[in-house]
Image (spheres, grey):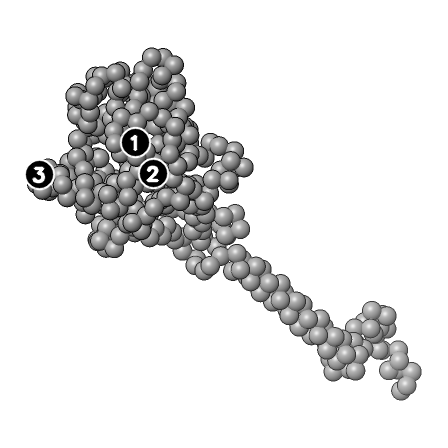
Amino acid sequence: MVGFHQARRPRQTTGARLRRELSWPRPAGVLISLLGAALIFNGAVALADSTDASVVSVASSSPSLNTTPVTSQALVAPADPASTAPASAPSSATATATVSPDLAVSGVTAAPIAPVTTPPVLLVKGSVAGAPVQKLFAARTATAAAGDKTVLDVFNPKSTLVLVNKRNALKPLAHVPADLVTPAVAVGSGEPGLLRAEAASAAERMFGAAAAQGVSITLMSSYRSYDTQVGLYNGYAAEKGAEAADTTSAHPGFSEHQTGLAIDIGDGKAGNACDFRSCSAETAAAQWVAAHGADYGFLVRYLTGSEAVTGYWAEPWHLRYVGVEVAQDVVALGIPTYEEYLGLPGAPGYK
């Protein structure tokens, strides 16, 4: 019988025997199944980690992710709450932003980043940005500008640039310059001559240059104290009324003469008939300072046609020292008033 069965059983190949040994539930088959499951599980975990990393990378490059393309609106703070447009009004600030290559796959539109703006440097304190005086000093070397920082202030009574008018009083009102001196010039009145040292030196050079050309300039008035201006203004007001007095005389504390930087001139050869009168514009002295005063740092402060800015009738005899650079720049630019040169409002009346 044994031989019969052996004769009838088909002969198995090596491959068939290997498949049989590795099939379930033989031990080898179970082991191979477990190894295969482990490999599949590890591969799935690795794939999941890789997908999460790419999502995090994209998310970190954008404030928010959305599968729908969006439009970014630039944020502009209104200068004034009242100027804010109503919600229903279309905004000109709305714009479609440029899409970043890194965000293109998500469909997200990147918001533009506003550039950082630096406020303009104001070398002359009190004046406005873009004013001619700012441009003048900005063009100077850094060393020169740095040396002038203590006096580049149009509201500092110690500065030769100080602005004094009906809306800008001296601070303090009873200010007295610390460096008053008597200039060596011809005097045409009984009033003592006093000026700040820098202005006095400039006046001496100017009077001397005019004399060399045959023009006789005389000093009629210069520094006036607060108390002196009180008496002078009150006299004009009593004579012709406060309204009329305000067109020719300053209130105490509001006078350029109190700075020690202003002078009133006369003509030594023309007599005194036109002293402090409009006809003084026809004298040789007034015409000479109008043409050459800036070369010595002086401006004819109150010109005809500028009354609405200065608040005073024209005074061809009234000169104000501002320094050679500034005076020449004002004349070269053809700017009629010091207020306009500083970029500041006019002062037709007191506040």
The residue lying furthest to the front in this view is 190
Q: Which residue is identified by label 1?
A: 263
Circle 3: residue type: Glu
Residue 184: % across, % down: 39, 28
Front residue of 244/91: it is 244
- Residue 215: x %, y % from top left: 31, 15
Cα distance in 3D space between marks 1 and 2:
8 Å
Image-based side of 180 in relation to 349, left or right: right
Choose top left, top right, bottom left or bottom right for residue 238.
top left
Task: Give the residue type at disc 2.
Answer: Gly
Q: Residues within 10 Å of mark 2 (few under 14, many from 20)?
A: many
Q: Position of residue 107 (x, y in %)?
A: 45, 52
Residue at 23% in and 50% down: 83
Kindly identify which residue carries mark 3. 239
Seen from this angle, which residue lies furthest bottom?
1
Q: Position of residue 125 (x, y in %)?
A: 39, 44
Between 260 and 307, the one nearer to me in the picture: 260
Q: Is residue 242 left or right of residue 293?
A: left
Q: Quadrant of residue 291?
A: top left
Helix, strand or loop at label 3? It is: helix
Image disc number at residue 85: none
Which of the two discs, 1 and 3, labels the residue nearer the N terminus?
3
The kind of secondary structure element at disc 2 is: loop
State how far apart marks 3 and 2 are (Cα): 27 Å
Task: Tell me the residue that label 2 is attached to.
Answer: 260
Element on which disc 1 rests? strand
Q: Is residue 214 visible?
A: yes
| Position of residue 272 in the picture relative to residue 117 (left or right) | left
Q: Residue at x 25, y 55 (%)?
A: 81
Identify which amino acid the numbered label 1 is placed on. Answer: Ile
Pointer 3 or 2: first along the chain:
3
Q: Residue at x 32, y 33 (%)?
A: 193
